[in-house]
Image (tube, coloured by chain):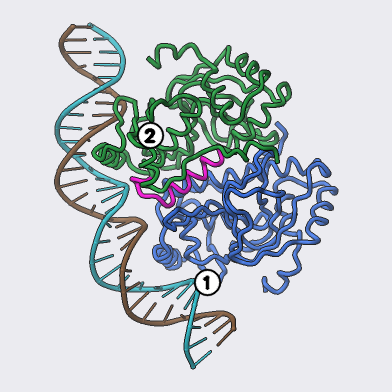
Chain colours: A green, B blue, C cyan, D brown
Amino acid sequence: MTQMNAHFASAAAAIRRFDAIMPLDEGAIAALHEAARRPRRVSAHHELLTEGTAISEPHILLSGWGARVRILPDGRRQILSLLLPGDMIGHCYQPQPLAITSVVALTAIDLCPAPSTDEVESLRHVYAISHALDEAFLLAQITRLGRMSAYERLADLFLELLERLSLSGNAQHNAFDHPLTQELVADVTGLTPVHVNRVVKRLRHRDEADWHTGYLTLSDPDALRRRIGRTPFQISQAMRRRG
Amino acid sequence: MTQMNAHFASAAAAIRRFDAIMPLDEGAIAALHEAARRPRRVSAHHELLTEGTAISEPHILLSGWGARVRILPDGRRQILSLLLPGDMIGHCYQPQPLAITSVVALTAIDLCPAPSTDEVESLRHVYAISHALDEAFLLAQITRLGRMSAYERLADLFLELLERLSLSGNAQHNAFDHPLTQELVADVTGLTPVHVNRVVKRLRHRDEADWHTGYLTLSDPDALRRRIGRTPFQISQAMRRRG
DNA sequence: CGAAGCATTGACTGGGGTCAACTTATGTGG
DNA sequence: CCACATAAGTTGACCCCAGTCAATGCTTCG
């Protein structure tokens, strides 16, 4: 289903996300479509960027999931952030050409170079907001790891994923394709795979979440949000206004 | 001692840090000195920025320590990152005028508006690198919280502080003023104050660190780095080169 | 000198890690 | 289309790191 047209890389998800972040003008839409016409495909487990390596140009993730990863000398692995359709990869402000982290494809993914802001001025603003959102997700990740229980971490992560995937139109009816293994979720949440399994079981028993064969459904996101005291993520109107 | 001339806000630390990040030209130094002439003083525990509030203009922390903080509905508190002399506050790329987190003064601090890059073009590059470093510290914080034991978290944090404070000349001989309470360190490391105390005790007994009356000494940073497998933080040459 | 904040310690608990077996998917080649 | 191999999910038994509760010192500083 999702797989069937996976090789028709489409700009749809990315454009929906950017447009949700901030309404796009025609030039921006055209440029994004054009850029997405010759996507690069990378298969799962391959490294897109290597920590300490030069960054070429910023890219846009068209489909599939990626992650920024850090690995400790003894092999422990931490996923710093997840990259979803419409997210940018390697977007930074000129001076620093070195990748600050490795980026890996968690599934097969399609990506394309991000249209230059020199050509489409209006994208500058969109990219900047996208970048600010990325930082917001890092901060959310820190609070998750620092001050939440295992149960809260999973619930919070699932809610974040639902909210983010909704932006790009990759979620419907509180459900979405969730291609990660429990081990990868463990690497995001700072837990062990075994314990992730136990907590997922609990979520299932409570009828709060169902996660089978790569598809995750949250039965009542609002109730879950209230339960763990999560402020629903939203792009504030003010965020869009120029300072 | 440190307190005695605290009311003579000085640009020295900030300039040393920026210059260490990337050699400054005379125009930049002059602008920084000028900006630091009329510093704003904020006493401990006061909020500099409130989450969701409009950001005025970027500032430079001249002296004292601050923190980006997030508080959960039930009162749990997580310090997202520490702000040290020479660090920037509220530096972001135009479009997003809302503070993404609260910022509080942990000690009495002095700050001044950051000279505009419109006036001193060369500062743009320096600010960008400073911003990239901030992000790098967030990523370090994530790995600390996600994949390190309490012992490693404290050792890693202390080493990061030593390295960062060395840049601004606020550390000498592997030692520095450390004004935080154990409770605040707990809020940085995602632990409880009680457990921070126990780990600090262990560090003391092993003669790895000594922390008394606001002064922290690491007896052998390199040995400690090796022990916990920490890559010494450094600003790579390549980071300074223009892409 | 007393009060308030911070550091220190002990006794106890529990959330989450570890180890290991077993089951269920996924997938690959014959 | 089945047989087997490999990866992923599931479960139980056990343990330990770090949290909790609570008492006691130790500093500041008014």
Residue annotated with mark 1: B212
Residue A184's disc number: 2
Query: In which quarter of the view is residue B4 placed?
Result: bottom right
Secondary structure state at the residue bearing disc 1: strand
Tell me whether circle 1 and circle 2 mark residues in contact (CB < 8 Å).
no
Q: Identify the residue at image location x=51%, y=55%.
A: B79
The chain ID associated with circle 2 is A
| Between A166 and B34, the one nearer to me in the picture | A166
Residue plotted at (82% across, 46% down): B25
Residue A222 position in % (x across, y down):
39, 40
Q: Is residue B83 left or right of residue A78?
A: right
Start-end of magenta stretch: A134-152
Chain where mark 1 sits: B
Q: Is residue B238 visible?
A: no
Identify whether B116 is placed above or below A88.
below
Q: Quadrant of the N terminus of chain B?
A: bottom right
Distance from Cα at disc 1 to Cα at disc 2: 41 Å
In the rendered image, residue A137 lying in the magenta stretch gets the answer: yes
- Secondary element at tag 2: helix
